[in-house]
Amino acid sequence: MRIGVLTAGGDCPGLNAVIRSVVHRAVAGHGDEVIGFEDGFKGLLDGHYRPLDLNAVSGILSRGGTILGSARLERNRLREAAENWHELSERTGIDALIPIGGEGTLTASRMLSDVGMPVVGVPKTIDNDINGTDRTFGFDTAVGVATEAIDRLKTTAESHQRVMVVEVMGRHAGWIALESGMAGGAHGICLPERPFEVDDLVKMVEERFARGKKFAVVCIAEGARPAEGSMPYEKGAIDQFGHERFTGIGNRLASELEKRLGKEARPVILGHVQRGGTPTAYDRVLATRFGWHAVEAVHRGDFGKMTALTGTEITTVPLAVGVEELKTVPEKRMYEAESVF
Ligand code: F6P
């Protein structure tokens, strides 16, 4: 069998671990050939690929990023891939494709699967917002980076009696903010799933100062929004998927808190540092398991599916389930974190 693999969308720690695992299982386990397409679906369409053998993936388990390169999708080019699938498979000689990616990539994979392409997707994202899987790899690493940042911000905040507002990634889901906020003991956590009241944050900081704790750290998701009328707020433009574009909420909240509290507040935007560097052991293991099971699914002919973590087991679920909605933080998880505003 000849299996194609590609990584598309934003990068994420653990991508190389999946590629390595696919190659190990396919080549060493089944005697397959594996080729890696460069820069996501673009490589598939343009015929840019290279053979991946055991030596090609040696030493990449712990490396961040992706040895194949990644690119976001161009919708018209995807249509091109769907329309020319038979020609593409003849040209590249692949019997199955394993695309590794987030919501956009899995949506594209579903589209390709619907026109008969034998696809098994592997979900990836630091945001942990893919439906149908309990976890995505990359998330644990991102939460670790954000947690360390909160720990570090607490000491400098305390030295200067400041409020620190740390903005973390996560798109329209608050998983990274929730879990890093809990792990770092942030005094305030703001999530996209629940508009926050600025008055409540002000009250929290004032109470802390009143009892002698003269600093505070607020962890805010990039997609968080203030409750209607709770602070001056100009909404972001709506993107092609119907989501509001991010508006730099960390900066805005820090200046609003500074104004209302009369105390120094500093914004810290963590940004892509959360996606870079070496994956944690947890992410390496999950990514390796996903790669192994994706190859097994290919050999079973279990196409149109993606790998998923269900409890402690790796399963496959229809791509349609993965992309039908974003997995956001449920109310019950917010109650467990006492500082969600
Ligand atoms: O989906 C992963 C992610 O890092 C989000 O958390 C973030 O909103 C987005 O990608 C950033 O995208 P880009 O790399 O295009 O700036």
Image (tube, rainbow, N blue to C red):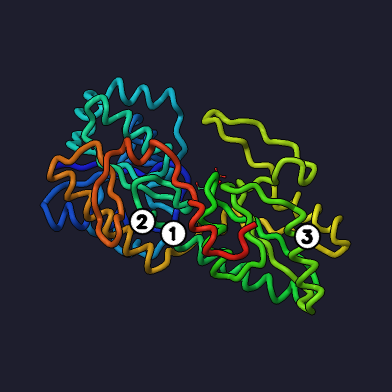
Between marks 2 and 3, how big is the CA–CA gap?
44 Å
Residue 278 vs 32, above or below: the answer is: below
Q: Which mark is residue 202?
A: 3
Q: Residues within 10 Å of mark 1 (few under 14, many from 20)?
A: many
Q: Are marks 1 and 2 in contact (CB under 8 Å)?
A: yes
Please tell me which of labels 1 and 2 falls first in the chain. Answer: 2
Horizontally, residue 45 falls left or right of residue 34, namely right
User: Residue 57 in the image: x percent, y percent?
Assistant: 29, 58
Q: Which mark is residue 64?
A: 1
Residue at image location 36% in from the left, 56% down from the top: 16
User: Residue 91 in the image: x percent, y percent?
Assistant: 22, 29
Between marks 1 and 3, how big is the CA–CA gap?
39 Å
Snapshot quadrant of residue 158: bottom right
Q: Which mark is residue 16?
A: 2
Residue at image location 47% in from the left, 37% down from the top: 72
Residue at image location 75% in from the left, 53% down from the top: 198
User: Is residue 309 at all visible to an observer of this figure?
Assistant: yes
Q: Is disc 2 placed on a helix, strand or loop?
A: helix
Q: Residues within 10 Å of mark 2 (few under 14, many from 20)?
A: many
